Image (cartoon, rainbow, N blue to C red):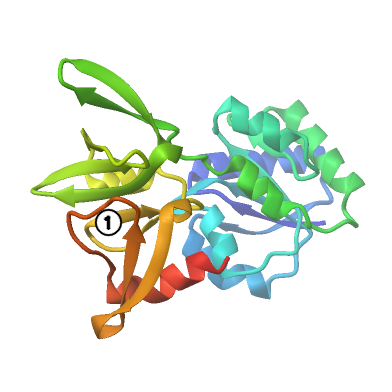
Amino acid sequence: MKYIILEDEKLAAERLKKLVLASRPDYQCVLTMDSVESAVISLPALRVDLVFMDIQLADGNSFDIFDQIKLDVPIIFTTAYDEYALKAFKANSVDYLLKPIDPEELEKAIQKFERHANKGNEQVDGLLKSLQPKGKERFVVKVGEHLKTVETVDVQLIYSQDKATYLFTKEGRKFLVDYTLDKVEDLLGADQFFRISRKFIVNLSCIKDIIAFTNSRLEIVIAGFEEEQVIVARERVSEFKAWLDR
C-alpha cells in the first residue's frame, strides 16, 4: 500500500511515518507535504491508496483542498478538533486520529481503512460537513444596562457603519456588536451567510429580492432594512451567484 502524509509539523509527520512502519512494514510513504498548495498541485498526479491528512496545514485548512480538486482516495484525518465533531466523524468509514497519535488508535484506523479499501472515498463530502465548524449560534449584545442574546438564525444582515458593526434582525431591530465585520465573517457558517462587500454580510434565507444594479452589480432587498442600499460588489458577483446556485 502506498500512502501520503499531509502534515505541517515535521516531527509529527516523522512520528506518524515511524508508527505506520511499525504497524505495516509493507506500507510505503511516497511523499510528505505540508500545505494546501502543494497538495492541490501534487495529489491529482499521484496514485496512492491512502492519505493521512492533518486538518490545519501551513497555509490554511485542508478542507480547502476539496474545493479545488477531486480526491477519490480514502483519508484518515489527524486532528486536534473538538470532541463533538470527532464523535460525529467517528461513525463514518473514513477515520481520524487524535493528536498525539496513539499506536493502538492508529492500528484501529488502518484496520478500518483495510476493511473498506475497495469502497473508495464516497463519504468524504459528508465527513467534511460533519467536521466543519457549524458557525456561531448567537451573539451577546448590550441593550441599555442589560445583556441579551440574539440567535444567529434571526439575523438578516450584518453591516459596518461609522467604524462599528451592527446586526439587523428579522424583527427589524439593530444591535451593536463588539466585533469587526471581518471577525463576524470568520465566526459565521459559510452555508448560510455571504460577505457581499466590504460593508455587508447577508443571510441567504432573508434575501427577499435580487435586482440588477449599475456597473454589473446587484442590489439585495432585505425586509425592513431602509438605511441604505445593500449592494453586491462587482468583484463578488460571480462568487455570490455560485453561492446561491449550490
Please tell me how crowded label 1 is: few (under 14), some (14-19), or many (20+) other residues with Cα within 10 Å.
many
Residue that protrudes farthest toward the bottom in the picture: 215
The part of the image, by quadrant, that contains residue 21 is top right
Answer yes or no: is residue 131 visible. yes
**Percent x, y for residue 88?**
69, 33
Q: Residue at x 42, y 36 (%)?
A: 136
Question: Residue 144: x percent and y percent?
Answer: 15, 20
Residue with the most extreme left position: 162
Which of 198/114 is in front? 198
Q: Give the vertical position of 140 relative to 129 (above or below).
A: above
The residue that mark 1 highlights is 200
**Left or right of 103: which side holds 77?**
left
- Quarter of the picture holding the C terminus: bottom right
Tell me where residue 108 appears, x and y as whole percent.
Answer: 81, 33
Question: Can residue 101 be spotted in the picture?
Answer: no
Q: In this view, does 58 lie above or below 130?
A: below
Q: Quadrant of the N terminus?
A: bottom right
Instruction: Classify residue 24 as left or right of residue 204.
Output: right
Q: Give the residue drawn at x 42%, y 58%.
A: 207
- The residue sitting at 24% across, 50% down in the picture is 159
Name the amino acid, label 1: Phe
Dot 1: element: strand
